[in-house]
Amino acid sequence: MIEETDVEIGALELVSGATIPHVVQRVTRYGCDPRPDGSNVVFVAHALSGSSRVLEWWDGLVGADALFDPARWCILGTNVLGGCYGSTGPSSPAEDGRRWGPRFPVVTVADMVEAQRRALGALGIPRVAIAIGGSLGGQQALQWAHGYDDAVNHAIVVGTYDHLRAQGIAQNFAAREAIRLDPRFAGGWYDEAPVDGLRLARAIATLTYKSEALFEQRFANRPDRSGGDPSRDLAHRFDVEGYLAHQGDVFVDRFDANTYLVLTRAMDLFDLRGRERPPGKARLTFVGIEGDQLYPPGFVWSCAARWAKAGWDAEYRHLPSDHGHDAFLAEPAALAELLRDRKACAGPLARSEPT
């Protein structure tokens, strides 16, 4: 069973103090009917460019005979607040009938999760067994446990931790500036998408999504496979340049520039350090990814250790991969296998907390 619906949750006051008067959450549901106690419900939170349609981007983890099989689970996804795939965001109409555009307020991961919680409640689903996500989705899963641990049994936090380092914030800044500097951006009031800025933003981000080992293995310093000789013409590309250009071309056809600004700022603002509330009932599983340049696994390990020290039932799992940050999407079968056995060893980072 697949069911997609738009859930109106009314006005939402944000952490910033601003209020969005009318909020809609796009919710997609797969599989079984939810049990009253939520014991068969999995909430899957998407990363930066994902959507509520989980099977379109995580079908190796969710799907027939996968870790979360719709024959046994009720699987729910929402498009985040500020998104561009059905939920209220910068492309949505504001109260004056114009699209929000650059007027859309700053949103936080806490705002996203509050909107999700209200939407699921409106559908008669007050609690979930598992909240899982990678990257921005992992931030949401952790926020579920932190803010509403009575509404989730187990949060699985993949390829992220309880804050974003200055390095990650700087990389997000560079990507946002690429969008803002595109003349088509027009201060956020574009009618024609700022495709050049979006392409460059995606290229900058991709440098953090893939590992150096993967780039060397796939591309090295070879000329672009589609032709050209960079040793003879400055306009010709290396193979890795062609790859980055292709990623940008695909991205501009499916994503909104203002949404990029809103969601990356939410990632920047996410910071639960020093806000570890008394231990909740929710269990926490943190997954660090080998070669992850955006959320290095050593920091994921130290986050898990920090939450465990605070009294939470928290553990760390290590995902070996050459893909880097994107491994949670590129190697879902390996991630599923890592999560099947809760007694799996902690991996090579089971050592003293990194400095």
Image (cartoon, rainbow, N blue to C red):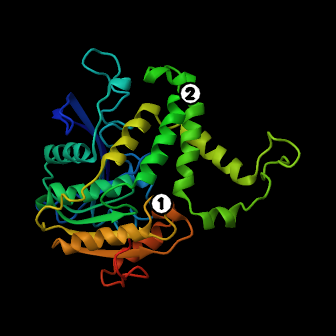
Position of residue 202 in the picture relative to residue 307 (left or right): right
Give how far across and how far down residue 125 sits, in percent: 15, 52
**What amino acid type is highlighted by mark number 1?**
Leu
The answer to whether one can see residue 66 in this image is no
Residue at the extreme top of the image, as rendered: 96
Give how far across and how far down residue 73 sits, in percent: 27, 64
Q: Nearer the viewer, mark 1 or mark 2?
A: 2
Of residue 207 and residue 48, the one placed in the foreground of this image is 207
Residue position for label 2: 182
Position of residue 250 in the picture relative to residue 309 (left or right): right
In the structure shown, which secondary structural element does the residue marked by tag 2 occupy? loop
Residue at the extreme front of the image, as rendered: 355
Q: Earlier in the sequence, mark 1 or mark 2?
A: 2
Name the quadrant containing residue 11: top left
Position of residue 315 in the picture relative to residue 255 (left or right): left
Residue depicted at x 35% and y 54%: 137
Residue depicted at x 23% and y 69%: 307
**What amino acid type is highlighted by mark number 2?**
Asp
Residue depicted at x 34% and y 66%: 68
Of residue 352 and residue 25, the one placed in the foreground of this image is 352
Task: Locate the C terminus by quadrant.
Answer: bottom left
Note whether 199 is above or below 347 in the view shown: above
**Numbered-mark total:** 2
Residue position for label 1: 329
Give how far across and how far down residue 79 sits, in percent: 33, 43
